[in-house]
């Protein structure tokens, strides 16, 4: 397993991230593709986890909100790779990246079905449930 990182929206790594997100969010969850790819793509840091046989299996992006806070977004694991702790591995890599770049907090909007996943990784929920792309979410954050 290896995790590659890019900010280059013309790179193969980024294109692998988009392919994963299209399968998970657009095809599986019915999120409109016009919402899935947004104006923040070029500002975000994109992570893609590759399996031992070089298959792109999971992705996440970090969007800087300010000098101390990243927003973790677009975390997705392809269906055939779920249950293998790849989601935790890629989130932990994103956290390492944030710490190395002296960020202090990661915030995210978790789908309610993923709230327990993020709690196990040390994130705390706050605020009211909200809708994003027609799916219930909860705000969560973690101090690094």
Image (cartoon, rainbow, N blue to C red):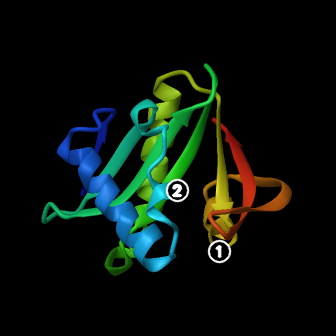
Identity of the residue drawn at 44% across and 51% down: 37
Identity of the residue drawn at 48% across and 23% down: 101
Which residue position is annotated with label 1?
Answer: 113
N-terminal of the two: label 2 or label 1? 2
Give the residue furthest to the left.
53
Could you give the CA–CA distance between mark 2 and mark 1, rounded to whole angstroms? 20 Å
Residue 17 against residue 77 in the figure, above or below: above
Residue 126 against residue 101 in the figure, above or below: below
Is 129 situated left or right of 71 in this image?
right
Is 69 situated left or right of 57 in this image?
right
Is 68 situated left or right of 77 in this image?
right
Residue 100 against residue 96 in the figure, above or below: above
Viewer-nearest residue: 128 or 26? 26
Residue 136 against residue 141 in the figure, above or below: below
Identity of the residue drawn at 32% across and 54% down: 17
Quadrant showing the C terminus: top right
Viewer-nearest residue: 45 or 51? 45
Comparing labels 2 and 1, the label whose residue is closer to the camera: 2
Is any part of residue 83 visible from this angle?
no
Which residue position is annotated with label 2?
Answer: 35
Q: Under tag 2, what secondary structure? A: helix
Quadrant showing the N terminus: bottom left
Q: Under tag 1, what secondary structure? A: helix
């Amino acid at each position: 397993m290896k995790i590659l990182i890019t900010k280059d929206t013309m790179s193969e790594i980024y294109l692998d991230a988009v392919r994963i997100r299209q399968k998970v969010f657009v095809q599986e969850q019915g999120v409109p593709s016009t919402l899935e790819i947004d104006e923040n793509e070029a500002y975000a840091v994109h992570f893609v986890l590759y399996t031992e046989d070089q298959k792109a299996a999971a992705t996440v992006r970090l969007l800087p909100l300010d000098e101390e806070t990243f927003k973790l977004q677009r975390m997705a694991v392809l269906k055939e790779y779920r249950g293998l702790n790849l989601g935790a591995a890629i989130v932990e890599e994103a956290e390492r990246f944030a710490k190395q770049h002296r960020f202090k907090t990661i915030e995210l909007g978790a789908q309610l079905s993923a709230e327990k996943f993020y709690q196990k990784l040390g994130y705390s929920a706050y605020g009211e449930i909200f809708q994003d792309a027609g799916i219930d979410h909860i705000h969560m954050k973690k101090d690094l």
